[in-house]
């Protein structure tokens, strides 16, 4: 490591001191550069400019608020988002990271729930979203001042006065995804964030000489703590891309890493799959990934197969196998808990699946099993990194609170200075989740011999081997898709109003052991007489896709009063999952997606139909073919008059389809186009009527980032 790049990490007590230290050390250095279209520089800001703008904004914000008031950040990714955040910090306010309300009003519900839960008195937005924010605030019926970031008077920076803050002061609220009725805002104190960002710098060996590329949404802890605050702690420079740009064209992400010789970048497991599928051989020839030392993989379940495929695909671009770094963390710990060291490759272990489901570790060697046994009885679990000296991680029996031996699976509990102060205004939940005791038992006397307090219950299942953490499942029922946390009760409630033949409080949504999202739903007694189950299932799939932007992998309709529940009537989602996987449900009808699509560009069938500009029939046929290839279904099974959301495409698929159409038809197409023209027929009619090469439908790079990805743990 270059000795000139080693950083001196002083003991900061708050984020203002952190930024002001960088101003004194690296004032003129560019800290953030926005690549709006994925390649061209749209805007830059230095550490000194960030401090000046934050001071100026703080003076104006203080005129509208009191210290400790909450201020929502309602902007897309960009430099103004960072300025808005630090404007709040310099004013002594509590920032609430969120995103801009979109034109579709169905997206407003969660923002309104956050606004009311945080009791925010300020809404910070960009000039282009001013009218949308005003309309949303009017509908939310919440008294809230609006402030446009970028219109602050820079001359007022000299009037700034340091607020009365310390390490215990809450810096911002990080809201989890899920229920619009009961959002949870994680209270992250200045001290928590200073501790966690310093840990990230330490464990990822970040220096002020190391360039960083990020496309992750800033309202998410991985995007903000990991790729805004941690680089600032190191004094590094960050190149920012917009999430929709990367989802539409993942090559642009890798190109930015290559062009700027980035040492750090990353995202959820799905983005690595997306790159393998969507980056062509020709594009790969232009990439140099030899400087990429930390390709972090988190925010959703990690798959060893994904790591191997990504490494094999991009090794010819100079990517080192050591660069692939599975990691683990969550908003409740600011972000980071574990990761793989810079000089080490990721680890994985093969275990007996049946034993693992019972909480025991039984290692399996591939040579010990035949091919069928390997498929049925072996599970490959990748490690999420090694333990470190600042985060105490224990594997605990959640019922007895006993620390388990290394050969046992239990709930992952964490203690350390990075652990948050709790959830905003949720004392009952805090009592259950935070500040728990763990008990150490003597194997000889079977008595408690020691007790440690202050542990966070993560709700994740895992085990520790040789000082490395492995995440094997989830004790909690939250569903994670593309890094987004979704509460099953929300999806269940939406489904049960689709048709009168679906029983209220009779559904269960869960994620299978291979991460497929499944709905099991009772029909009513009247519904048992209905034989038109195919239409009901299609309506369910469309409703879920349209409201949550996810695709169900299976829908199972079951007999009345047959859903597994407790004696008090609580839905046993994990029990229903077990019954589904065992084939033991009392089903009356079932739909299942036909396998996983192989979407690698070079592996597409050679009989792809011609896509003729201006020809509605040709465009419609090509789109149907694309969907059939994506979902691995017969072309005849794709109905051009069916809603695209009901076919099984999720939001990432939709963006990919839009991008391919834009490239092949030489049109700039909005990322929201598929929502504006919801069927293949309607979309084809619009595209055929648009003059080829006219660039007539301008790209909307501010598509709702929230519904694209990333609301989970790393």
Image (cartoon, helix red, strand yellow):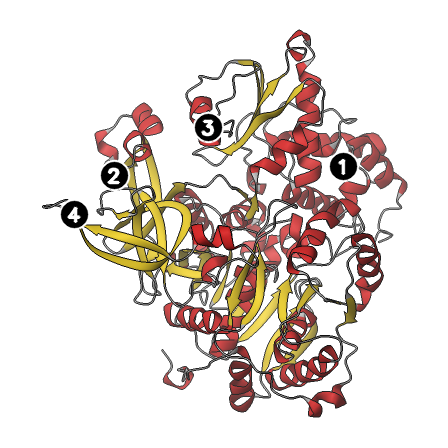
Is residue 611 visible to the viewer in this orientation of the structure? yes
Seen at 58% across and 49% down, the residue is 280
- In the image, 430 versus 26, the foreground residue is 430
Q: Secondary structure at mark 4?
A: loop
Q: Secondary structure at mark 1?
A: loop
Seen at 49% across and 48% down, the residue is 300
Of the image marks 3 and 2, the number of the one nearer the N terminus: 2
Of the image marks 2 and 4, the number of the one nearer the N terminus: 2
Of the image marks 1 and 4, the number of the one nearer the N terminus: 4
Numbered circle sitting on residue 577: 3
Q: CA distance from mark 1 to mark 4?
A: 73 Å
Of the image marks 1 and 2, the number of the one nearer the N terminus: 2
Quick check: marks 1 and 4 in contact, CB under 8 Å?
no
Q: CA distance from mark 1 to mark 2?
A: 53 Å
- In the image, 280 versus 6, the foreground residue is 6
In which quadrant of the rendered view does residue 638 lie?
Answer: top right
| Residue that badge 2 annotates | 361
Seen at 66% across and 62% down, the residue is 38
| Residue that badge 4 annotates | 447
Q: CA distance from mark 3 to mark 2?
A: 21 Å
Q: CA distance from mark 4 to mark 3?
A: 36 Å
- In the image, 151 versus 6, the foreground residue is 151
Quick check: marks 2 and 4 in contact, CB under 8 Å?
no
- Whole-percent x and y of residue 658? 73, 45
Q: CA distance from mark 1 to mark 3?
A: 42 Å
Q: Quadrant of the N terminus?
A: bottom left
Are there few (<14), some (14-19), or many (20+) residues within 10 Å of tag 1? some
Are there few (<14), some (14-19), or many (20+) residues within 10 Å of tag 4? few
Q: CA distance from mark 2 to mark 4?
A: 25 Å
Q: Nearer the viewer, mark 3 or mark 2?
A: 3
| Residue that badge 1 annotates | 611
- In the image, 551 versus 30, the foreground residue is 551
């Amino acid at each position: 490591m270059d000795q000139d790049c080693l950083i001196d990490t002083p003991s900061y007590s708050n984020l203002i001191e952190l930024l002001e230290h960088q101003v004194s050390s690296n004032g003129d250095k560019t800290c953030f550069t926005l690549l709006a279209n994925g390649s061209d520089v749209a805007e830059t800001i230095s550490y000194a400019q960030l401090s000046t703008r934050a001071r100026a904004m703080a003076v104006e914000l203080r005129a509208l608020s009191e210290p400790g008031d909450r201020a929502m950040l309602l902007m897309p990714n960009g430099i103004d988002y960072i300025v808005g955040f630090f404007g709040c910090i310099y004013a002594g306010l509590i920032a609430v990271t969120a995103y801009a309300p979109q034109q579709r009003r169905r997206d407003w519900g969660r923002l309104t729930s956050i606004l009311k839960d945080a009791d925010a008195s300020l809404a910070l937005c960009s000039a282009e979203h001013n009218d949308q924010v005003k309309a949303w605030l009017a509908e939310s019926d919440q008294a809230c001042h609006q402030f446009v970031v970028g219109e602050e008077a820079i001359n007022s920076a000299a009037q700034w006065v340091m607020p009365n803050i310390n390490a215990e002061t809450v810096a911002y609220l990080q809201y989890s995804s899920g229920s619009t009725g009961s959002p949870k805002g994680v209270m992250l104190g200045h001290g928590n964030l200073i501790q966690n960002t310093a840990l990230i710098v330490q464990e990822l060996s970040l220096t002020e000489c190391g360039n960083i590329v990020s496309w992750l949404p800033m309202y998410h802890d991985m995007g903000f703590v990991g790729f805004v605050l941690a680089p600032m702690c190191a004094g590094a420079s960050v190149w920012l891309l917009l999430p929709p740009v990367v989802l539409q064209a993942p090559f642009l992400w890798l190109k930015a890493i290559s062009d700027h010789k980035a040492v750090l970048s990353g995202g959820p497991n799905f983005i690595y799959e997306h790159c393998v599928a969507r980056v062509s051989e020709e594009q790969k020839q232009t990439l140099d990934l030899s400087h990429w030392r930390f390709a972090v993989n988190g925010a959703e379940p990690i798959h060893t197969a994904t790591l191997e495929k990504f490494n094999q695909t991009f090794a010819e671009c100079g990517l080192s196998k050591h660069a692939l770094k599975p990691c683990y963390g969550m908003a409740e710990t600011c972000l980071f808990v574990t990761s793989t060291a810079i000089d080490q490759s990721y680890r994985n272990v093969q275990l007996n699946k049946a034993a693992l489901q019972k909480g025991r570790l039984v290692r399996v060697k591939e040579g010990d099993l035949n091919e069928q046994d390997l498929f049925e009885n072996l599970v490959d679990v990748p490690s999420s990194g090694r333990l470190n000296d600042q985060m105490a991680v224990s594997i605990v029996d959640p019922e007895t609170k006993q620390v388990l031996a290394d050969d046992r699976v239990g709930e992952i509990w964490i203690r350390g200075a990075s652990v948050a102060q709790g959830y905003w205004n949720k004392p009952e939940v805090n009592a259950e989740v935070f500040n728990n005791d763990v008990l150490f038992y003597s194997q000889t006397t079977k008595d408690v011999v020691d007790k440690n307090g202050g542990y966070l219950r993560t709700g994740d299942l895992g085990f520790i081997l040789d000082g490395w953490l492995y995440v094997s499942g989830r004790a909690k029922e939250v569903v994670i898709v593309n890094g987004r946390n979704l509460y099953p009760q929300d999806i269940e409630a939406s489904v049960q109003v689709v048709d009168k033949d679906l029983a209220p409080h009779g559904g269960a949504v869960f994620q299978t052991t291979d991460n497929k999202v499944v709905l099991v739903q009772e029909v009513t007694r009247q519904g048992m007489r209905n034989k038109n189950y195919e239409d009901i299932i299609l309506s369910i799939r469309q409703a879920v896709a349209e409201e949550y932007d996810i695709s169900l992998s299976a829908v199972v309709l079951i007999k009345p009063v047959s859903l597994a529940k407790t004696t008090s009537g609580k839905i046993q989602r994990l029990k229903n999952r077990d019954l589904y996987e065992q084939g033991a449900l009392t089903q009356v009808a079932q739909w299942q997606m036909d396998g996983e699509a192989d979407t690698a560009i070079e592996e597409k069938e050679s009989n792809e139909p011609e896509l003729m500009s201006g020809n509605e029939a040709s465009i419609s046929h090509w789109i149907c073919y694309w969907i059939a290839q994506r979902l691995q279904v017969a072309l005849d099974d794709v109905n051009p008059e069916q809603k695209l959301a009901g076919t099984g495409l999720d939001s990432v698929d939709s963006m990919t389809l839009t991008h391919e159409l834009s490239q092949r038809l030489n049109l700039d197409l909005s990322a929201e186009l598929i929502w504006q023209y919801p069927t293949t027929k309607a979309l084809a009619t619009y595209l055929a009527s648009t003059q080829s090469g006219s660039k007539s439908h301008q790209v909307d790079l501010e598509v709702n980032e929230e519904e694209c990805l990333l609301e989970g743990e790393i």
